[in-house]
Amino acid sequence: MHSMSSSTRPRSLSGIQPTADSFHFGNYFGALRQWVGLQEDHDAFYFIADLHSLNERPDPSLLRQRTYASVAQLLAAGVDVERSTLFCQSQVVEHTQLAWVFNGLTGFGEAGRMTQFKDKVGRRGEENANVALFTYPILQAADILLYNPHHVPVGEDQRQHLELSRNLAQRFNHHYGETFRLPEPYIVKGTARILDLQDPTSKMSKSASSPNGIIDLLDDPARARKKIRSAVTDSGSEIVFDPETKPGISNLLTIFSAITGEDVETIVARFEGRQYGHLKVELGDVVADFVAGFGERTRAYLDDLAELDRVLAAGAVRAREVAAPVVVDVYDKVGLVRGV
Ligand code: TRP
């Protein structure tokens, strides 16, 4: 049971979109593992941001399948529903209800200045970009502020969205009275920045990396091993950790350390006098073992979709216990009629 009750622990909250068949090492070592760690001393809320993923109009059956796969992976990663509230965004109607109020508080220019929005419109072209892409950060603000979290563990790329959430909280409080806590971004210790195996100067990313540059948590072990063995390395032959001059080898060392928990220095010392190839062979095995175990745990969860539905239903009930009174309060404060 809890060592501290939920009321005394700081609250953390984060979400992830179900946009791929599998999360990758960048997601896992850069974020998901911290989610799991935060459960120890936080009242944690984690959700699948399925509504957010509608900004790409995904195939319906694929979206549903990926949502289940996302839940299963979070469970396999160690999100513990005894301690944390795990839910699906679309099953907690309060997210869209609060987002609508925030739409009314957000300036057109303000939303247009979000760099992620500008990047995506730039890539897709204006005719292929929809309004959900534009209002995306406003829904994200609702996701966050409904739970009044102290900490929101997110990657650097979400900093501006978090800033918008803080601004909206402040603006709402100013106009309608103290309601929301200003959430802090939480760039957690121990986060490993995992880079593209084929281009170790940029981060491992689903949208930007080539398939061989990414290791998926659900990769077949042999395939994952092969990707490590064909990772781009650097000139020279000495195994040292130096992200500036040896980005490729340093990335492999980071991955090694992230999986085994050994310090990078310890690993470097062990490989003294040996070649890149030796490191790749050993790391290939470590990675293959890791994805084998992860895949097995995930598939076990996916074998019982009815149980996943129950997990999500229970999570939604707990999330709504927090979120529903916030919407009642907000609707009241902005002057919507109360009803009976
Ligand atoms: N936009 C986030 C991402 O792409 C996902 C997300 C949606 C989120 N709502 C959130 C993250 C609320 C933290 C809090 O990574």
Image (cartoon, grey):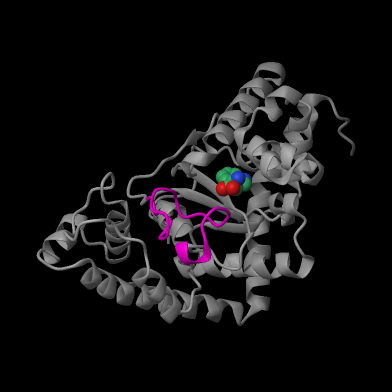
Residue 97 in which image quadrant: top right
Rendered location of residue 92, percent (x, y):
72, 52
318 or 257: which is nearer to us?
Answer: 257
Quarter the N terminus occupies = bottom left
Rendered location of residue 185, percent (x, y):
48, 36
Q: Residue furthest front?
A: 235
Q: Is residue 106 above or below residue 280?
A: above
170 or 180: which is nearer to us?
Answer: 170
**Residue 86 visible in the current orientation:** yes
Residue for point 66% across, 35% down: 118
What is the magenta segment's predominant secondary structure? loop
Residue for point 37% across, 65% down: 231
Q: Is residue 291 above or below residue 30?
A: below
Rendered location of residue 331, percent (x, y):
79, 32
Quarter the C terminus occupies = top right
**Residue 139 visible in the current orientation:** no
30 or 124: which is nearer to us?
Answer: 124
Rendered location of residue 110, percent (x, y):
68, 24
Q: Is residue 65 above or below residue 19?
A: below
Residue 329 in which image quadrant: top right
Q: Is residue 41 left or right of residue 235?
A: right
Q: State yes or no: residue 212 in magenta.
A: yes
Residue for point 78% across, 65% down: 60
Q: State yes or no: residue 313 in magenta.
A: no
Q: Is residue 305 left or right of residue 200?
A: right
32 or 19: which is nearer to us?
Answer: 19
Residue for point 66% across, 37% down: 117
Q: Is residue 272 above or below residue 102?
A: below
Report the magenta residues as a range: 193-213
